[in-house]
Image (cartoon, helix red, strand yellow):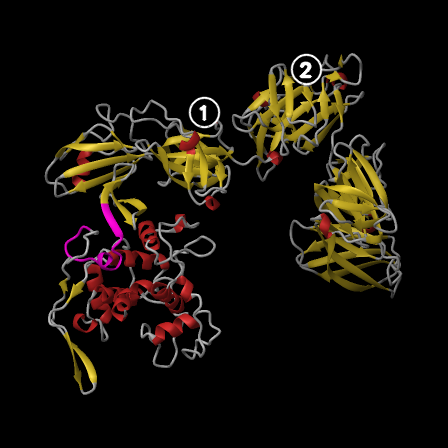
């Protein structure tokens, strides 16, 4: 038993896990394992397994304590090992409570492992590559004393011998002084399995003065095969043949026709692994170059060529041959940039084998986890062909499945995959690396330049938007690279509605104004007239992607996949069509039908597209005076119902053609951005942005440097906590009570002027929501239930809260906090609430809960300060404040706060001694450029922009 342990010690000391099982493992971090064949075989024979999370952690270093547990597993089996414990500490740094104490105690008692001279074991210590190689050599039978593995220069002798028999094969960067990682240990142990064992002649042990000394021959010789099976197919006896006699190695070819090794253990297949190619190319190559690179001395006039595992045309690999692997005479169009050409040379028989393997691009359409062999389904974006380079191969059904650890993938991931035509299945799938940036230029069929870097096209390149010619410079794209760094997939950058706009009108530098300009309807419903870097008259009436430079000059590019539901033109083109009745566009469709209760949108007869929760709608409606209002909605469920025919009349009456210009996602029929002129049409039930103003946060009236007068509120705008400047003098018809600091307000359809001040808003539409107000909020049983009103929970009215409801707490200072889950709401009999009940589904969509402090004493401040005005300026770390209406000798506390998100963050307060009538003082404060600050004193406030 001890002799056996002395041989396997080096192997098991490398691993820090304990589960023993047969068969290759699919680890969750397979993609991070460099030495896949070694890890598969070592885990397949039951020496090591992955962690409980399913990963292997290939780069983690080894510890001595974990190795002791592995040894126990090998000797006793996992079940018995699990019962091991220590009655006393085996070493002074291994208490009985140490997780490895039982294993270390057992191994120490059996003489398998030893501690250090200072009485420690150092269970967390690591092993160097040199030390590990010494253990492996000992396991193979090499004698340390004879081979010189002792003394000051022992490492030199160890590495010379280890490298000589191939223990470090596969790792060209071996550094003996570094700690061994788990996958390196697996590699070296894997090599040891195939290494030949040695022994010495006339090896005896004698006692000299009480010391045991080994006397042996001075040269190791290989152990004869004997009665052991020749499973490694090499002369004499290898380690695996003696200690893992059920492990078998067979030379074969893989599904790409590459020379390969097949490993089995106890009859179960571990895997088939291709040999390393002698030379590899990533583009078409001359046959004469292959001859030179292989250092051949004799030609192979019938070198076999395989394409994705299927035999193609033989070629002549000969000196100076300028014909390429793929030419018009043989293997036409099979090799291009991005193809992998692996060449294998059997020097003994002068046989050359050339294997062409194409890489394709696809997306993960789905994954199946709840089966015995989990798999992902790949939707090929590339055209896959047979060896004739023209007959397409359909990658669908079961052929699109790839068994793997599905945790490594998500739906819609862009992946690289290989396909074996001989096996008719996908052989590998990995996530593709991506690069984002602005397209500078591209050369058809060859390359593109993204963010100042040029990338070649890979052979099987694909475009998510259908055609390379659809790309436009100065637009943003995401490119995916193959393993050689070439572009294999081009996608539009993830849709960002904020960068899209509708071009309403244009004028060129040849116009009377002498400059290039456009009028844009932005994605937030605002209208901007901007200077442009070029003449964009050709883009009038379409949707564009835009970018503004630091001078405010805009560059426009037509968005991809723009569609119209008619021969739409702008009403401005012909003044005989008044905007008040026709809207800003005309010549749309008189059978337009969009309902917010369904995804389908009929843009015109025979054309149906679909909206989803991410679709952005900009809807134009004009009043009798020709004023056009642009409202923005996100999601089809929040958009209005728009119909050409009025369903409220009987029979239905056509009211107005509806114009729609829209973009779709790639070649699909899913709308991403839409501009709709609904003037005169039937429009109802649009759920527009909801604005909440926290009364307790209202400031006194502020007059800024441009004489704008407004009140600053903590607010919620749709689902964002922010601040809103409410213009003191609201437009006619506005329901907003500017300066109100007693009652919270909820409004919709807010309009803002070019100074960013809210100028008007409408009351919540009863066709959209039922407004609930009252006192008393109650936590009820049920995941999405809440009680409102009443003095007790049982007396309240139960409501269902939508799963995506927007809920907020407002404290007594008007500070707003988002409520992420209805379960986080506490019962409060004194809290007041405003709720918006969706009339369509009957669920609460918005809920604002106001906390109440009945003991709070409101006032102008503890100092009773009363001023008639305040102003401030900032320069180089100093705020200069001017107070108007001051009294000589009175102390005035001046506070400077940062306007941050939904509240004010106090920075500093300074006491200023007043002078008669007007006082000017300086306060030291380091303010940040681009930020907004509030300077307050008593009942006066001033907004300071830096």
The residue beneath circle 2 is 591
* Extent of the magenta region: 233-250
In the figure, is residue 275 to the left or right of 448? Answer: left
The image position of residue 283, as x and y in percent, is 29, 35
The image position of residue 22, as x and y in percent, is 35, 52
Q: Is residue 902 visible?
A: no
Q: Which mark is drawn over residue 115?
A: none
The residue beneath circle 1 is 469
Residue at horizontal 82 percent and vertical 38 percent from the top: 771
The image position of residue 697, as x and y in percent, is 80, 51
In the figure, is residue 742 to the left or right of 297? Answer: right
The image position of residue 260, as x and y in percent, is 25, 43
Residue 236 magenta-highlighted? yes
Q: Is residue 532 visible?
A: yes
In the figure, is residue 924 to the left or right of 467? Answer: right
- Seen in the picture, residue 424 relative to 125 is either above or below; the reply is above
């Amino acid at each position: 038993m001890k002799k056996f342990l002395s041989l396997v010690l080096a192997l098991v000391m490398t691993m820090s896990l304990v589960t023993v099982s047969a068969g290759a493992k699919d680890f969750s971090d397979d993609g991070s394992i460099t030495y896949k064949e070694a890890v598969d075989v070592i885990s397949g024979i039951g020496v090591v397994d992955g962690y409980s999370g399913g990963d292997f952690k290939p780069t983690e270093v080894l510890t001595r304590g974990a190795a002791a547990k592995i040894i126990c597993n090998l000797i006793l089996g996992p079940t018995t090992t699990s019962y091991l414990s220590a009655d006393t500490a085996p070493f002074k740094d291994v208490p009985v409570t140490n997780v490895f104490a039982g294993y270390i105690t057992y191994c120490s008692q059996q003489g398998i492992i030893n501690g250090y001279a200072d009485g420690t074991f150092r269970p967390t210590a690591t092993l160097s590559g040199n030390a590990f190689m010494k253990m492996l050599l000992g396991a193979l039978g090499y004698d340390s004393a004879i081979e010189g593995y002792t003394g000051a220069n022992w490492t030199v002798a160890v590495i010379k011998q280890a490298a000589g028999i191939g223990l470090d094969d596969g790792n060209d960067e071996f550094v003996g002084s570094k700690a061994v990682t788990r996958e390196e240990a697996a590699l070296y142990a894997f090599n040891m399995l195939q290494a030949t064992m040695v022994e010495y002649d006339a090896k005896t042990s004698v006692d000299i003065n009480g010391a045991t000394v080994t006397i042996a021959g001075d040269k190791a010789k290989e152990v004869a095969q004997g009665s052991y099976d020749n499973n490694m197919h090499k002369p004499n006896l290898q380690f695996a043949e003696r200690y893992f006699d059920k492990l078998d190695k067979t030379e074969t070819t893989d599904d790409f026709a590459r020379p390969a090794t097949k490993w089995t253990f106890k009859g179960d297949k571990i895997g088939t692994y291709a040999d390393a190619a002698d030379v590899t190319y990533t583009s078409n190559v001359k046959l004469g170059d292959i001859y030179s690179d292989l250092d051949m001395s004799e030609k192979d006039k019938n070198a076999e060529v395989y394409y994705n595992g299927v035999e193609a045309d033989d070629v002549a690999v000969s000196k100076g041959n300028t014909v390429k692997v793929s030419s018009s005479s043989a293997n036409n169009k099979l090799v291009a940039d991005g193809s992998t050409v692996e060449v294998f040379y059997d020097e003994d028989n002068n046989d050359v084998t050339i294997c062409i393997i194409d890489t394709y691009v696809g997306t993960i359409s789905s994954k199946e986890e709840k089966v015995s062999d989990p798999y992902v389904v790949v939707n090929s974006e590339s055209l896959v062909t047979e060896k004739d380079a023209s007959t397409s191969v359909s990658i669908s059904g079961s052929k699109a499945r790839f068994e793997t650890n599905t945790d490594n993938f998500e739906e819609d991931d862009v992946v690289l995959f290989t396909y074996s035509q001989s096996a008719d299945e996908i052989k590998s799938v990995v996530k593709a690396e991506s690069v984002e940036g602005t397209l500078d230029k591209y050369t058809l069929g060859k390359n593109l330049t993204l963010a100042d870097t040029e990338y070649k096209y890979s052979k099987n390149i694909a475009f998510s938007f259908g055609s390379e010619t659809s790309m436009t410079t100065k637009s943003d794209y995401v490119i995916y690279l193959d393993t050689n760094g070439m572009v294999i997939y081009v996608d539009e950058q993830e849709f960002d509605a904020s960068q899209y706009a509708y071009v309403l009108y244009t004028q060129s530098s040849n116009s009377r104004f002498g400059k290039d300009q456009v009028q844009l309807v932005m994605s937030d419903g605002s209208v901007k007239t901007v200077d442009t870097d070029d003449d964009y008259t050709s883009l009038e009436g379409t949707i564009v992607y835009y970018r503004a430079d630091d001078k405010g000059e805009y560059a426009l590019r037509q968005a991809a996949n723009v569609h119209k539901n008619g021969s739409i033109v702008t009403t401005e083109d012909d003044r005989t069509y008044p905007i008040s009745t026709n809207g800003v566009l005309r010549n749309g469709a008189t059978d337009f039908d969009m309902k917010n209760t369904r995804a389908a949108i009929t843009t015109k007869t025979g054309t149906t597209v679909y909206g989803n929760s991410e679709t952005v709608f900009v809807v134009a409606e004009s009043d009798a005076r020709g004023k056009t209002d642009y409202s923005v909605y996100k999601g089809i469920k929040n958009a209005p119902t728009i119909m050409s025919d009025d369903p409220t009349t009987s029979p239905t009456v056509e009211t107005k053609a509806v114009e729609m210009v829209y973009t779709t996602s790639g070649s699909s029929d899913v709308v991403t951005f839409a501009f709709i002129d609904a003037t005169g049409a039937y429009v109802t039930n649009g759920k527009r942005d909801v604005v909440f103003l926290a009364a307790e946060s209202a400031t006194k009236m502020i007059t800024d440097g441009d004489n704008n007068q407004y009140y600053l509120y903590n607010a919620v705008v749709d689902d964002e906590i922010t601040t809103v400047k409410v213009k003191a003098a609201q437009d006619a018809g506005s329901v907003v009570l500017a300066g109100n600091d007693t009652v919270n307000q909820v409004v919709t359809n807010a309009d803002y002027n070019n100074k960013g001040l809210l100028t008007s808003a409408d009351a919540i539409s009863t066709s959209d929501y039922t407004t609930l107000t009252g006192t008393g909020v109650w936590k009820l049983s049920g995941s999405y239930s809440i009680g409102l009103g009443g003095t007790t929970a049982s007396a309240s009215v139960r409501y269902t809260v939508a799963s995506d409801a927007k809920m907020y707490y407002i404290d007594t200072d008007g500070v707003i906090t988002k409520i992420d889950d209805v379960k986080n709401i506490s019962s409060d009999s004194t809290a007041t609430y405003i709720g918006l009940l969706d009339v369509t589904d009957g669920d609460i969509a918005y809920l604002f809960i106001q906390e109440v402090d009945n003991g709070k004493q409101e006032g102008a401040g503890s100092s009773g300060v009363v001023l008639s005005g305040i102003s401030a300026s900032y320069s180089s770390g100093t705020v200069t404040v001017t107070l108007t209406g001051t009294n000589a000798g009175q102390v005035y506390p001046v506070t400077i706060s940062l306007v941050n998100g939904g509240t004010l963050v106090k920075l500093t307060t300074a006491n200023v001694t007043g002078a008669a009538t007007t006082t000017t003082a300086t306060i030291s404060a380091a303010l940040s450029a681009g930020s907004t600050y509030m300077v307050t004193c008593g009942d006066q406030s001033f907004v300071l922009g830096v």
